[in-house]
Image (spheres, grey):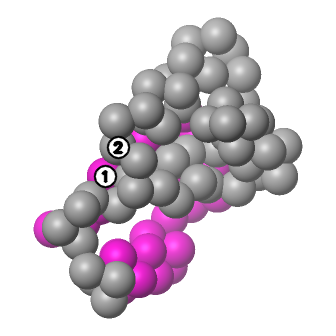
Amino acid sequence: MHPAVLEWAAGEGRILLTADSKTMARYAYERVTTGLPMPGVFVIGDSVSVAQAIEDLLLLADLSLDGEWEGRVFRLPIR
């Protein structure tokens, strides 16, 4: 299922949000190494509150450039 979710996100040009730090990052990097598009993955850590995750995501949305997260896995929290 994980590769299918990443395929959908890539087709839609969407960054994927996940709490699955064990397998999703691996599948994302597999897409990158095989040359498939991967708009980015944000992994929300277990210790991050919903409020903190939303705050961080809003900050990233405000400050990010188009395509900045292409091929990258970024872990939250920011600080």
- Percent x, y for residue 32? 58, 21
Camera-side residue of 18 and 12:
18
Q: Quadrant of the C terminus?
A: bottom left
Please give the residue where the numbered disc 1 appears in the rendered image.
Answer: 75
Amino acid type of the residue tagged 1 in the rendering = Arg
Q: Residue 46 sits in which quadrant?
A: bottom left
Q: Which residues are magenta?
A: 53-79
Q: Tell whether label 1 touches label 2 (CB within 8 Å).
A: yes
Magenta span contains residue 11: no
* 57 in relation to 68, above or below: below
- Percent x, y for residue 65? 56, 60
Answer left or right for 11 relative to 52: right
Q: Residue 57 sits in which quadrant?
A: bottom left
Q: Quadrant of the N terminus?
A: top right
Please give the residue where the numbered disc 2 appears in the rendered image.
Answer: 21
Report helix, strand or loop for mark 1: strand
Q: Earlier in the sequence, mark 2 or mark 1?
A: 2
